[in-house]
Image: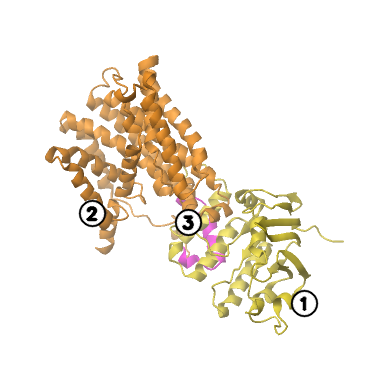
Chain colours: A yellow, B orange
């Protein structure tokens, strides 16, 4: 018997002009796994994330979260279905402090937005500290997010997503811009946090070392379609994947796409 | 480090010492007792301009939404209140409330469309809607008085006395600004800034970006309408010019010159602009030149507003 997938798509399509960025994707993500989406540039990975989180509306197909249809919901509603995400280009609120960033996510999720007499600086302070502590950012709490070094902004973005109390977390290139030697540490942190909270993680990542070390399952996209899916071992052995993506000489290391 | 003391507040806030607020309040309270009458009339205008500028700054500063139609809501408040007194004969304080409510409704309708656009298109649409309302005030002569204005809408005694009216406006504007300040300091204010800084990130953490902007637009227009309905009974008249784009631009100037990043910025801007526009023409016919000079100097010396001069000095000192 198979467990009900926590997130799945049926025949998902998105076209931009004449290009089908996502062309009939059927995805099924099991609860509690770290599921990586890989593929060359332009394979439709980020478009798929935009579709899953409501930033884009699919031309066709359905998206289900825990069996409920969420197709076409706007992003701020999707997140209330406990699906949170980060962005490929790190996106935080630069003029607010790290703590205020996290507080705001807590405030928005907790329904504080329409309480004009509640002072924002007292809202969810302890909870926000706790989340900053989890991502090891508590010492930067009072610094403005725009002043933080890139690596800390990445962590803050993770904190913002965690503040939404997700069951499903979508990470769009969490290690981009992070020096290669520091990546395993960051991913260990991610792994630890998601495991502690029982979060299902969907991961877009270009660093194959990261992918093969943290992912339980991997889906390979190419030109908007799924060309392989399985465990890291199965995907690595897949001849089609090796042909279009990993390159013959690559054995789970080095850069993707033969660059 | 993380400890219990830092839990108290999110960020240590720079606060003005108590004596600043006390002397400011005391000054505002005794002002009409020491100033000659024309200056009291002017002081009421400054208070109303401060409310207009502060309400606009909810959009410009907090929301990053440059509206060039803000004075139109001031006009709606003033004209609706004045017309209801003059043509229908309702009691004036009730019509001031109705005028404000009309501005809220108008802003809700116009804002509904405007927040769907971004950047320059938002600016253009607010300008277009503003001029549309202006044209109604200007052309609908039978009701609004057109170019000749809506005149003779004075409230009954004792409210015609400028000192009495000053205190009324001081209380109402004070309450309105206090409420606006609370909104700005609430999670809603933080969300509005978040939508300004990073709309996608804001939506991704559960903020309905457009709805937040729409609410800000509605509140902002409503407070402008309140200022307008107090204005019409202050001067006993209302003219289309007060609702036109020049008046909107003047409100933007107050907010930007004073400093859009802080709540007090537009208040300072309103005081400075209105005081200069009142005093300098008495000294020279070339007063607009000097007003322009002040703006140019401020743009170079205090690009984020006059209030930042003080902040910067403190940091260096």
Instruction: Name the residue at the bottom extreme.
Output: A249
Q: Which residue is drawn at 53% across and 50% down?
A: A107
Which residue position holds label 1?
A: A233
Question: Does any portion of residue B187 appear in the rendered image?
Answer: yes
Q: Label 1 lies in what chain?
A: A
Do the numbered discs 1 and 2 sit on residues whose CB atoms are within 8 Å?
no
**Where A9 sits versus B93, above or below?**
below
A56 horizontally vs A151: left or right: right
Instruction: Using the rendered image, report if marks 1 and 2 lie on a common chain.
Output: no
What is the secondary structure assignment of the residue under circle 3?
helix
Q: Quadrant of the C terminus of chain B?
A: bottom left
Residue at x 34% of width, y 24% of height: B146
Q: Which residue is under mark 3?
A: A100
Could you confirm whether marks 1 and 3 are on the same chain?
yes
B207 or A14, which is in the foreground? A14
Check chain identity for marks 3 and 2: say if they share one.
no
Q: How far apart are marks 3 and 2 (CA)?
A: 35 Å
Q: Name the residue under label 2.
A: B297
Bounds of the magenta span?
A119-141
Give yes or no for residue A125 being in the magenta stretch.
yes
Name above or below for residue A259 compared with residue A127. below
Q: Nearer the viewer, mark 3 or mark 2?
A: 2
Q: In which chain is the residue bearing label 2?
A: B
Question: In this rendering, would A102 be left or right of B276?
Answer: right
User: For mark 3, does the 10 Å Cα neighbourhood hold few (<14), some (14 to 19), or many (20 or more) residues?
Assistant: many
Camera-near label (1 vs 2) is 2
Q: Is residue A161 left or right of residue B31?
A: right
Image location (x, y in percent) of residue B279:
17, 39
> Alpha carbon of mark 1 to alpha carbon of mark 2: how far?
68 Å
Q: Can residue A112 be seen in this view?
A: no
Residue B29 position within the rendered picture, expressed as x and y whole percent measured from the top left: 24, 34
């Amino acid at each position: 018997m198979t467990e009900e997938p926590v997130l799945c798509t049926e025949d998902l399509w998105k076209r931009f002009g004449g290009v089908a960025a996502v062309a009939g994707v059927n995805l099924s993500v099991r609860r509690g796994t770290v599921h990586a989406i890989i593929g060359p540039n332009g394979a439709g990975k980020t478009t798929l994330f935009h579709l899953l989180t409501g930033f884009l509306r699919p031309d066709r197909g359905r998206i289900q979260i825990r069996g409920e249809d969420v197709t076409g919901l706007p992003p701020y509603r999707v997140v209330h279905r406990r699906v949170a995400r980060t962005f490929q280009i790190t996106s935080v609120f630069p003029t607010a402090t790290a703590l205020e960033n996290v507080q705001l996510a807590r405030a928005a999720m907790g329904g504080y937005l329409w309480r004009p007499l509640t002072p924002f600086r007292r809202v969810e302070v302890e909870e926000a500290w706790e989340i900053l502590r989890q991502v090891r950012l508590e010492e930067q709490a009072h610094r403005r997010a725009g002043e933080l070094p890139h690596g800390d902004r990445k962590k803050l973005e993770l904190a913002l997503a965690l503040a939404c109390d997700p069951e499903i977390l979508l990470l769009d290139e969490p290690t981009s811009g992070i020096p290669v030697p520091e990546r395993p540490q960051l991913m260990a942190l991610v792994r630890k946090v998601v495991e502690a909270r029982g979060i299902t993680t969907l991961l877009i990542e270009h660093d194959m070392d990261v992918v093969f070390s943290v992912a339980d399952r991997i889906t390979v996209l190419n030109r908007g379609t799924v060309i392989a899916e399985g465990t890291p071992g199965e995907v690595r052995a897949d001849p089609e994947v090796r042909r279009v993506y990993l390159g013959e000489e690559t054995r789970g290391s080095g850069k993707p796409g033969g660059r | 480090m993380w400890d219990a003391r830092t839990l108290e507040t999110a960020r240590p806030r720079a606060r003005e010492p108590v004596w600043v607020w006390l002397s400011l309040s005391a000054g505002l309270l005794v002002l009409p007792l020491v100033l000659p009458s024309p200056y009291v009339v002017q002081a009421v205008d400054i208070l109303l301009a401060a409310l207009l500028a502060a309400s606009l700054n909810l959009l410009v500063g907090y929301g990053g939404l440059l509206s060039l139609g803000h004075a139109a809501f001031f006009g709606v408040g003033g004209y609706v209140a004045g017309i209801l007194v003059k043509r229908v004969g309702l009691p004036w304080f009730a019509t001031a409330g109705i005028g404000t409510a009309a501005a809220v409704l108008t802003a809700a309708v116009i804002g509904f469309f405007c927040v769907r656009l971004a950047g320059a298109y938002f600016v253009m649409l607010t300008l277009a809607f503003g001029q549309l309302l202006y044209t109604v005030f200007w052309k609908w002569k039978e009701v609004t008085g057109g170019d000749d204005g809506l005149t003779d809408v004075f409230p009954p005694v004792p409210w015609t006395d400028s000192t009495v009216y000053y205190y009324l406006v001081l209380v109402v504007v004070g309450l309105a600004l206090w409420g606006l300040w609370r909104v700005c300091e609430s999670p809603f204010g933080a969300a509005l800034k978040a939508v300004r800084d990073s709309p996608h990130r804001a939506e991704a953490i559960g903020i309905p970006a457009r709805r937040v902007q729409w609410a800000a637009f509605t509140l902002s227009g409503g407070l402008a309408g309140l200022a307008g309905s107090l204005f019409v009974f202050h001067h006993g008249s209302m003219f289309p010019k007060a609702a036109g784009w020049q008046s909107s631009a003047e409100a933007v100037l107050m907010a930007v010159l004073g400093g859009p990043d802080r709540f007090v910025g537009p208040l300072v801007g309103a005081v400075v602009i209105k005081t200069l526009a009142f005093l300098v023409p008495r000294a020279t016919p070339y007063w607009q030149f000097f007003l322009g000079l002040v703006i140019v100097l401020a743009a170079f010396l205090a690009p984020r507003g006059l209030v930042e001069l003080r902040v910067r000095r403190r940091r260096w000192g």
